Image (spheres, helix red, strand yellow):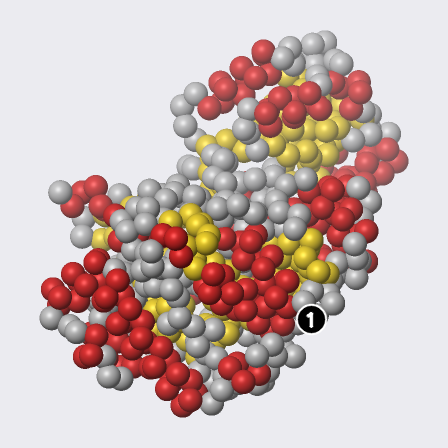
Amino acid sequence: MKVDQLSIFLENRAGRLAEVTKVLSDNGINIRALSLADTSDFGILRLIVSDFEKARAKLKENGFTVGRTSVVAVVVDDTPGGLHRLLEMLGKHNVNVEYMYAFVQQSGKNAVIIFRFDRIDQAIEILQQNGIPIIPGDKLYAM
Amino acid sequence: MIFDIKKETMPREELRELQLVRLKTQVERVYATVPFYRKKFDELGIKPSDVKTLKDLSLLPFTEKQDLRNHYPFGLFAVPRENIVRLHASSGTTGKATVVGYTQRDIETWAECMARCFMTAGAKRGDTIHNAYGYGLFTGGLGAHYGVERLGATVVPVSGGGTKRQAMLLRDFASDVICCTPSYALHLHEAALEVGIDIKKLPLRIGIFGAEPWTDEMRRDIEGKLGIKALDIYGLSEIMGPGVGIECVEAQNGLHMQEDHFFCEIIDPLTGESLPEGSVGELVITTLTKEGIPLIRYRTRDLTSLSFEPCTCGRTFARMSRIMGRSDDMLIIRGVNVFPSQIESILLETQGLTPHYLLIVDRDGPLDTLEVQVEVDEKLFSDEIKNLQRLEQQIQKNIKEFLGVSAKVKLVEPKGIARSEGKAKRILDKRKDCKN
């Protein structure tokens, strides 16, 4: 049920992000979802891509520091309160969200939210028990 | 066990007498045979007969690495070329190579010093010693080789490279002792595991490591992974090669210097003044018995201290503390002496591993500034900003606490600073650029 997310360490300088996208583009790798967190000195780019292993290998070859993080992709109703219900459920069980980012699917009916939890296995269990749809890695990469 | 009990446990008074006799002979020899020294002595108005006590050594001039380069290749030799039986040379990566020559007697002295070192480290007659120091112009391989033979042990002259094969030889020959660089020991450990050999389970019991700077943290790492005692050996080609000093297996606390052959002093690297026992400064060595290329007060550039406290192993030779850095690497930041090795230790303590780093010193108005760039490799990396910021703050706090200097810590992407080479560029002093 887990999704492999690529995390890339980036120094804050002009053109550095473009170097990442160039490596991905040159190797025919598609980006499914992304988020960029930054400080004044550095940033962390988090990506879900069509081919995790290839993207990681190619980025490493090009001198980037990359990490693998297990995240969970959850389908949330695209209606008011959809996300709130979910967070409340997790909060009750003391599962903490380290960070999250979202994208809306083409249909416009659902939003997909990528979560990084402090206790991922417990989070998955809670989501499943409550019938919240989780998108497994294989499906997400091929979306 | 002690290889030469008479010399190595000599009362210090007697040792001083022996050193003085040898020093006088040496000073006469260089004055008579090396024009470079004759000229230097004459310029300072010194005659060999002026050296009456060991204290008079401070009258004598220093010899620097540049002096060897300026007299490339044989200009500082003190014997006719036909008496030289062996030549070694440094790699010359930081300038012209320095060439050293040995007479037959020098080779014997060297072998004896190395044999003493092996025994000091706990090796004995009948042991099998895996020698992975490089053979060739570099003094490590052949220096250790002759020492093993002199000890009466079995040498495996494997030299460098072919690491997986080395792991197999280590197992098949059931070697008791290994000598190589400390980083190679860790590399060998990993390569061995790849071919299904756990060095920890082999009979190997002692590692003799030198030829590059290393830390106590690295020692613990090696000892844990290889299941051996790891001992630090010191030497430099200008003085002899490996075997100038070594830790004893009993105390594992400071390197015993072979003082009957090498007179050791600690000086202030800035003023050149001799410093008392225990002070940290630059190690200066005068060779007392060398024939081929005797050196007077050779500035090693290595920073350390000496202790004459009696050692539990019974040896009376002075003990040198682990090399703290190079005097040419010393930075003065807002009046505080800072060595890259100190920053390295702090990084090690903060994270438990040696990240690659660069120190950038600059000036902001009248104030010196220090920025420590730490490369973020996969081991340090976290996908969470707060973890990386915590790391920056922790390093910053530890530098302030241990060195009393405020530094800005900046995490940067890897730029391929080589770690195990020992010649990595660690300092960028921008203040030097603004002086003129």
Q: Which image quadrant is residue B272 in?
A: bottom left
> Residue B222, how many percent across, how many down?
65, 58
Q: Is residue A43 visible?
A: no
Q: Image quadrant for the N terminus of chain A? A: top right
Q: Which image quadrant is residue A112 in?
A: top right
Q: Nearer the viewer, residue B418 or B86?
A: B86
> Residue B206, how many percent across, how many down?
68, 64
Judged left or right of residue B402, residue B142 is right
Q: Eyeballing the image, is B15 above or below B112? A: below
Q: Residue at x 70, y 70 (%)?
A: B125
Q: Residue at x 43, y 43 (%)?
A: B91
Q: Give amino acid for label 1.
A: Lys
Q: Nearer the viewer, residue A70 or A92?
A: A70
Q: Eyeballing the image, is B276 above or below A97? A: below
Q: Is residue B102 visible?
A: yes
Reading the image, the residue beneath label 1 is B124
Q: Image quadrant for the C terminus of chain A? A: top right
Q: Residues within 10 Å of mark 1 (few under 14, many from 20)?
A: many
Judged left or right of residue B285, residue B48 is left
Chain letter for the residue marked with disc 1 in the picture: B
Secondary structure of the residue carrying tag 1 is loop
Q: Nearer the viewer, residue B34 or B322?
A: B34
Q: Which image quadrant is residue B228 in?
A: bottom right
How many circles with numbers are drawn on the protein?
A: 1
> Residue B112, how many percent across, how many down?
54, 69
Q: Residue at x 70, y 17 (%)?
A: A50
> Residue B8, how many percent across, how many down?
52, 81
Q: Residue at x 25, y 48 (%)?
A: B70
Q: Eyeballing the image, is B35 above or below B117? A: above
